[in-house]
Image (spheres, rainbow, N blue to C red):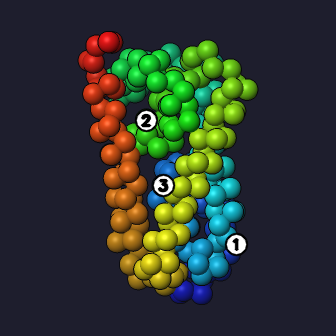
Amino acid sequence: MTDLSVEKFLEQYGYIALMIGTFFEGETSILVAASLIHHGLFEGPYTVLFGFAGSFISDWLYYTIGRLNGKYFVEHRPKLKEKFEPVTRFFAKHKIQILFTYRFLYGFRIIIPLIIGMSRISPLQFLLYSIVSGLIWAGTVSTIGYFVGRFFDLKTNSFEENILWIVLGFACFGLLIGYIVKRITAKEIAPGTEKS
C-alpha cells in the first residue's frame, strides 16, 4: 500500500477506524490518530470525539450486561471471576474516584463497568460519569499522541515503513500508563485482599 493510499484510507475511514479501535482496545488507536493531527489527517476535536465514542459504547455495553445479568456473565469467565470480589471491594471503597477515572485503569475496563452495572448506580448517573470520564481520557491521550507525533514528525509513510515499531511503541506507552495506575492500586485490588 502506498503512502497515498494510506492517506486516502484515513481520509475515508480514519474516524470510523478510530472509533472501532477504541471500542476494542483503547489507547493505541487514539494515540496513532492523534499523532497525525499535525499533518491534517485528523482534527483534534474529532479525534477526541470519535475516540470517546468508541470507549463510551464499550462502557455502556458492559454496564448493560452487568445491569441485566452480570452475575451470570462473570460466573462463566474465570479470569473476570478471579478479579470480581477484590475489584468490587475496591469500587465500594473508592466509588467516586473510580467513576471519574476508570478509563485509565488498564486491565479493568470490562469488569469495572460490569460492577457499576451491578451496583445501585442508575443509568442516568452512569451516563454523567461515563461522559466525564471518557472525555477526560480521550482528551488526555489525544494530547499526548499529538505531541509525540509533532515531536517525531510522524507521517503516514512513517507508519507504512515502521508500522510494527510505532504501534508497538504506542501500545507499550499505553500499557505503561495502565501499569503505573495499576501499581498504585494493586494492594487494594489484589485477589485475596481482606476488606479493611
| CA–CA distance in space, label 3 to label 2 | 14 Å
Residue type at numbered disc 2: Phe
Task: Determine whether, in the image, residue 147 is placed left or right of residue 163.
Answer: right
Evaluate if marks 3 and 2 touch, with contact meaning CB atoms under 8 Å apart: no
Give how far across and how far down residue 73 sits, in percent: 50, 22
What's the residue at 63%, 20% (across, down)? 121
Q: In front of the other: label 1 or label 2?
A: 2
| CA–CA distance in space, label 1 to label 3 | 21 Å
Vertical order, 102 against 13 (above or below):
above
Give how far across and how far down residue 59 sits, in percent: 59, 37
Q: Residues within 10 Å of mark 1 (few under 14, many from 20)?
A: few
Task: Determine whether, in the image, residue 105 is placed left or right of residue 46.
Answer: left
Vertical order, 72 against 32 (above or below):
above
What's the residue at 36%, 64% (across, down)? 168
What's the residue at 67%, 70% (across, down)? 43
Which quadrant of the figure has residue 165? bottom left
**In front: 141, or 28?**
141
What's the residue at 43%, 35% (across, down)? 108
Q: Secondary structure at mark 2?
A: loop
Give how far across and how far down residue 150 sits, in percent: 50, 78
Q: Secondary structure at mark 3?
A: helix
**Residue wearing tag 3:** 27
Residue type at numbered disc 1: Gln
Evaluate if marks 1 and 2 touch, with contact meaning CB atoms under 8 Å apart: no
Q: Quadrant of the C terminus?
A: top left
**Residue wearing tag 1:** 12
Residue 94's tag is none
Residue type at numbered disc 3: Glu
Q: Secondary structure at mark 1?
A: helix
Q: Mark 1 or mark 2: name the one nearer the start of the chain.
A: 1
**Residue wearing tag 2:** 108
